[in-house]
Image: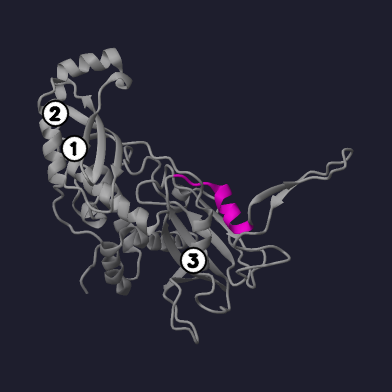
Amino acid sequence: MMNITLFDDNTKILEGPMQHNGDIYTYYNDSARPEVGNMRALLEKWFGCYPEDEKQDLKSRFQAAFNPTFYELYIYILFQQMGYTLSIHPELPDVKKCPDYLATKGEEKIYIEVKHIMMLTQNDQSLQRMQNTVLDALNKVDATNFLLKLDSIVFKDGSQPSGKMLIKFFNEALAVIDPDIYTADLIKNTYNGMPKITYDDDKITLEIQLIPKYPIHRGMGSGAIGSLPIVTQIGNDTENIISALETKASRYGHLNAPYIICVNKQSVSFDVMEVQEALYGSWEISWSEDSNNRDEKSRFSGNGFFGSKHNPKATRVSGIYVTNANTANLTTTAGHVFRHNHFAKFPVDLEIMNSIAELLNVPKDYPFNKGSN
């Protein structure tokens, strides 16, 4: 039988970061960057633990949808590290659909469903693709003397701006600016006092300022973008988490063992309170009007996914595991939490307390692995 690996054993020649609209699998497969090599090695190690007869299908899904498939493998390895044996897509009586895994440890059985969610609407995703295409074009601007400091990007309709026109415009604009004079003006006036270069047509308005390169770095090849606009998230992901869970709650009918849903939300931050509110309801404080005894109490309202004692919901679901893990953040910003459904028909005796790095035996300085041999 041919040994199936997740990535090709070829010479890695791709330098630099991935393009904003680049294919993730292709980039990981070909990148020569050491940190990507370390991520690739970890994924290959995990892939080696997967059943042989399932590897080709898993590899194909990595190539088609990298992030959701990464999370499936992450869950497989996580439960394996916790001492479980996992069966993939276990068949169920009277139900054509199959959960992702059945985890067993002695007499204990847990059905596991895996869900990866992006905190973007379809319109948001379309806008993100348009923006990424613009950023990939701007990275091709001649960066001999300057990097681009992007201050704002405004799309006027749903059509894609011309990358060639953007490159031509900014190449011509930068060609007539003396980097030494610009640097002196910048030191004197700061960015608040420096003019902006504006590109404007019927599809997009784009404003930039320039980051002058030190003389020693001028002429060196690099992507042209040096700074992107700051993006601030308003609100939280509570409703998105609930919606994702509701699609999975009764998908497999009435199971005869605990059933947990594992959700990976693709976002920068991880907020435990956000997860708590999604599952148990909004946090509320009540008190008595008696000035001598306020009897102040705080609790979850019970209007979340699990409901309340008087209105239990999702009783087929024994617990929820939520993370924001990706290939790069396992030792840095990745967080996770497991929460029980106290009203479940089949309660689960499961705790996930340690950090992701500890549970998965990931080196502390991953993905840079500076202390590795």
**Element marked by disc 3:** loop
Tell me residue 140's x, y (percent).
15, 40
Q: SS at mark 1?
A: loop
Q: Is residue 57 left or right of residue 92?
A: left
Quadrant housing the N terminus: bottom left
The residue depicted at 46 percent of the width and 69 percent of the height is 85
The three-letter code of the residue at mark 2 reads: Leu
- Pointers 2 and 1 in contact (C-beta within 8 Å): no
Closer to viewer: mark 1 or mark 3: 1
- Which residue lies at the image location 25% right of the left edge and 38% below the top edge? 206
Disc 2 marks which residue?
174
Q: CA distance from mark 1 to mark 3?
A: 46 Å
| Left-right relation of 302 to 177 | right
The span from disc 2 to disc 1 (Cα, nearest Å) is 15 Å
Residue interval drawn in magenta: 269-280
Q: Is residue 62 left or right of residue 315?
A: left
Q: Earlier in the sequence, mark 2 or mark 1?
A: 2
Q: Looking at the picture, does residue 39 appear above or below residue 293?
A: below
Which callout, 1 or 3, points at the residue further toward the start of the chain? 3
Single out the residue that lies furthest toward the front.
202
**Residue 42, position in %: x, y?**
32, 53
- State the residue position of label 1: 223
Query: For the residues marked 3 and 2, what is the alpha-carbon distance in whole angstroms?
Result: 59 Å
Residue at position x 29%, y 69% in the image: 55
Task: Specify whether residue 154 is in view.
Answer: yes
State the image coordinates of residue 264 (x, y, percent, origin top left): 44, 57
At label 3, which amino acid type do we have?
Answer: Tyr
Question: Is residue 144 visible to the viewer in this orientation of the structure?
Answer: no
User: Which of the numbered marks, if any, corresponds to residue 84?
Assistant: 3
The residue lying furthest to the bottom in this view is 94
